Amino acid sequence: MKLTLRIWRQTGPDEPGRMTTYDVTGISPDMSFLEMLDHLNEELILAGDEPVAFDHDCREGICGACGMVINGRAHGPERTTTCQLHMRHFTDGDTIDVEPWRAAAFPVVKDLVVDRSAFDRIIGSGGYITAPTGAAPEAHATAVPKPVADTAFEHAECIGCGACVAACPNGSAMLFTSAKVVHLNVLPQGAPERESRVLDMVGAMDAEGFGGCTNTGECATACPKGIPLPSIAAMNREYLRALSKGR
Amino acid sequence: MAVTGVAMLLFLVGHMLGNLKIFFGAPEFNAYAAWLRTIGEPVLHYGWFLWLMRLGLVAAVVLHGVAAYQLSRRDRAARPAKYAHRRQRASYATRTMRWGGVILALFIVWHILDLTTLTVNPRGQAHHPYENIVADFRNWYADVFYIVAMLALGLHIRHGFWSAAQTLGANNARRDRALKALANALALVLTCGFIAVPVAVMTGVVS
Ligand code: HEM
Ligand code: SF4
Ligand code: FES
């Protein structure tokens, strides 16, 4: 395959950036999007140019490191992570726009790499449970009804990739935060911090400068893990409940 | 946003149903308007209920507008850089919440000057709402403005009602489709119900 790539290049956090055009050839439809970028970078390095910086780690769709906006869509045209997106979903001769996540709370570090540590601080404010350390407890010691376990698992699937924020026209982190809150709040293990968790995590989210939710639904459409939009309602419900209990 | 929006929505349902009384003729419609002033008597003085209602509605509109402004400011700040690759995001109703809201705000101002204070009404005869409405909708520009505003209202409610259910935590996976259907039904019924009046005047059904 032969492609024209228009990639956001920016040398540093405070430098101006711009879209730069590259023609790449010799792309196999079986390459992942990241392998295609590796291929471009090898050519750039051989030509003595600076390779395109992008984040990645597991390359199997579970770490959430590899986010980028491809043709205006977070993680590109398929509902998966960029590392699991394959070039067979594009056609020979396509022009593809590649941009970093755009949000005030996710400043660009370099090229396609953004600083997502705002998410870490939200997790740190309440995304944990109080449990005695030491040997793992007997798995059946705390019974969890199947529907509750399913709900917790559905939300535990969030990999913190940030696609929801990147897709949201308001740069809101409600879907991510709701995934984390609902995951732990429905479980008996999460019950001791049920109220403080939602209040603190929403507080941390607001303090990081994410936008407010207007329920556009772009987040859930972009989420590679299918976190559903009603999860935001579930978090709001937890928030109102915690407020009424006075923590 | 959600609380004031739902309060206004409840009012609009009552208002729309009341407006439809115009199809029973001038005496009944004008008597209905007069009755509105006597609600709550003898506990309340004549007209007090109406003034309490107006106070509540003005508060709701102003708070809704202020919250919308604050939310929009915050959202713009959270997303300072645009994507170079542009594409349409979300549904039409969702995208037009802000400008649709501005149209509604302008409409509310005109509507009060027209049929409450009668300042800009072509007839402007106090205690004769039926005759004032008929005089009004004989002007094409009043019809156009009214109908455009009601279409904007329908779109606003289509997104707003479901959005409020999300905000207030009333939605969940099982209810999602039903709430969206209810939002569409409410939007359709309110828009058609309100538009029925100018259409009836234009076609001579009400005169
Ligand atoms: C003064 C004129 C108005 C303005 C400027 C305005 C503006 C807005 C804005 C900007 C939003 C938030 C955007 C979003 O959620 O996507 C909104 C939401 C909403 N509006 Fe309005 N609007 C107005 C009138 C009305 C009226 C007359 C109603 C009554 C039906 C209404 C009902 C709602 C509802 C229910 C919401 C959703 C609240 C939520 O998501 O929590 N609005 N409005
Ligand atoms: S909610 Fe979905 S899109 Fe958002 S961070 Fe989690 S996995 Fe990524
Ligand atoms: S590199 Fe880990 S999810 Fe893509």
Image (spheres, rainbow, N blue to C red):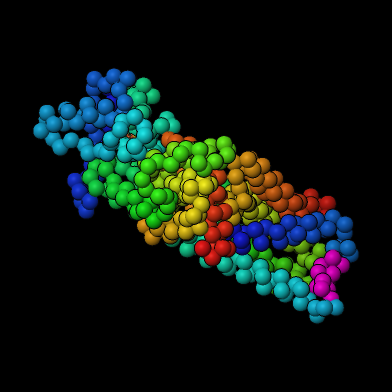
Horizontal side, residue B101 vs residue B20: left or right: left
Residue in view at x 42 percent, y 30 percent: A78
Q: Kindly tell me whether residue A93 is visible in this rendering.
A: no
Q: Which span is picked out in magenta?
A: B30-41
Horizontal side, residue A214 vs residue A40: left or right: right
Residue A35 lies within the magenta run? no
Snapshot quadrant of residue B116: bottom right
Snapshot quadrant of residue B185: top right
Give the total of numbered labels. Answer: 0
Q: Kindly tell me whether residue A61 is visible in this rendering.
A: yes
Horizontal side, residue A200 vs residue A97: left or right: right
User: Quarter for ligand 1?
Assistant: bottom right
Residue B69 in the image: above or below residue A56: below
Residue A209 placement (x, y as % from top left): 38, 57
Snapshot quadrant of residue A159: top left
Residue A241 in the image: above or below residue B125: above
